[in-house]
Structure formats: structure tokens, C-alpha cells
Amino acid sequence: MSELPSLVFDSGLEHADLSAALVWGLGLPGCPRTETCPGFLTELLARVRSTGESFLSSERRKAVRNMLRYGAFKPSGRSKPSSEYLLAAALEGDFPLVNPVVDVNNAVSLESGYPASVFDLDLCGYSLLLRRGLAGESYVFNPSGQIIDLRDLLCVCRQEGSGWRPCGNPVKDSMETKTRESTRNVAAVIYAPASESNDHIEQAAVHFAELLQSQCGATGTGVAIIQTLK
């Protein structure tokens, strides 16, 4: 049996208002750049534009921001959750098309209202940890070399020696582990408030796995839901 990815919560997140879904897709045929908008995304974008700003309810927007607000980190402006950025992009007609896996990630995030990260498993490794960023931690998040400060931000980390190195978060993911044309195995993390219905994040995760199979050609998919204590 092939190795499956895992995600654990750092002990410092105990009792935080946080759920996460780990979704994986294995055996992809590749990850070529998207040239035309796929049908499932065209349909979603049409629904978003016909509904407007209210597609993402104020209640969910507030709940996600409250989930992220901690210490020095404020989820607003350029640090707003990726789900809010995607809604604005959809309404402005500037929704990003990247590759099949990232397109699926962005579609699920937009439809659910929850931010999500996606990684090349062969670059990040199969053991992942979710913790808050430490003072002084940062990473490059785009080809231009822009850097995001990770202090107090929820971060997915990959194992590096005896420690953990951040590679993704609900705002921007690291260039080091992003998907590329050679990607064959992926994992995604959906971040959601534990105070909301667990059914919604499960539905988003299952939909993500289905799209990885139908739209990306994954031969093996799976889902795991992780929650802190309420």
C-alpha cells in the first residue's frame, strides 16, 4: 500500500476554534498549466457573479477571520484569508487559472468560504504539522520573491530534520512546495472554524477529493478531518 499523508495539530492549538481537512490525490498524470477555464469552474464563477458579495455570508467571513486572529496576526488587508481574495477575484472577472490542482483548490475554497492550501507531496513530505508561526519566520510566496511574515499565523509545516518548516497557511503558500508541471502527488489542507457545523468542512473535503479524481486524473484520493477540542 502506498504511503498516505498525515496532518497533526501542535499541542499549542488545543482548544482553539479550529478544524482542518486533509485531502490527498495520488498518481496524477501531471499538472500542466490551465489554458482554458474548465466547465466546473465556469459554472461556479457564474453562480458567484449572479449572487454577488453575499455568496460568502458575513457570518462565515467573520468566523474565519476570528479563527485566524491571534497575537500579532490580523486577518485583513493583504493578510485577508485566501477565500476572501478568491471571491473578490471572481466578482472582478480576474479569477486565477493556474493548473488543474490549484484550480480545484481555489474552486473548493471559493464555494465553501474556507481558505485552503495545496502542496506537492513529493516536495513537502508526507508528515505535516499545523501550528502557529514563530517570531522571525517567513517565506517567499510568489515568483517575484515577495515574503510573508508568519508570526502567529496558522501554518502547515513540513518536517525538516528534527524540526518543522512552514510551507503553507490560509493566506499565501510557500513557493518551495507549490505544485508544478511535474507534480504527481498532492495534499491540501482546508481550514475551518470548529464552532461551525462539521458537515460543511466534510462536504468541502469530499468534493475536493472527487474533483482531484475527475478533473486532475488522480488514481487514489482520500480525506481526513482533524479537530481541536471544543
Image (spheres, rainbow, N blue to C red):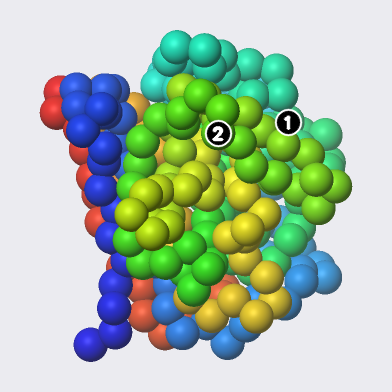
Q: Amino acid at mark 1?
A: Ala
User: Horizontal and vertical percent for residue 86?
Assistant: 67, 38
From the top left corner, tell me how far across and down residue 129 is, in percent.
Answer: 34, 48
- The crowding category of the residue bearing disc 1, from other C-alpha atoms within 10 Å (few below 14, some 14 to 19, many at least 20), is some
Q: Quarter of the image containing the N terminus?
A: bottom left
Could you classify mark 2 by the number of other residues whose Cα lies within 10 Å: few (under 14), some (14-19), or many (20 or more)?
Answer: few
Q: Which residue is painted at 76% across and 58% down in the image? A: 97
Residue at the spot of label 1: 88
Looking at the rendered image, the quarter that the C terminus falls into is: top left
Task: Identify which amino acid the numbered label 2 is placed on.
Answer: Glu
Against 44, residue 99 (above or below) is: below
- Is residue 115 visible in this depiction of the protein? no
Q: Residue at position x 78%, y 39% from top?
A: 146
Q: Is residue 29 shown left or right of residue 221?
A: right
Q: Is residue 119 depicted above or below 217 in this figure? A: above
Q: Nearer the viewer, residue 175 or 49?
A: 175
What residue is drawn where x is 73% and y is 31%? 88
Q: Nearer the viewer, mark 1 or mark 2?
A: 2
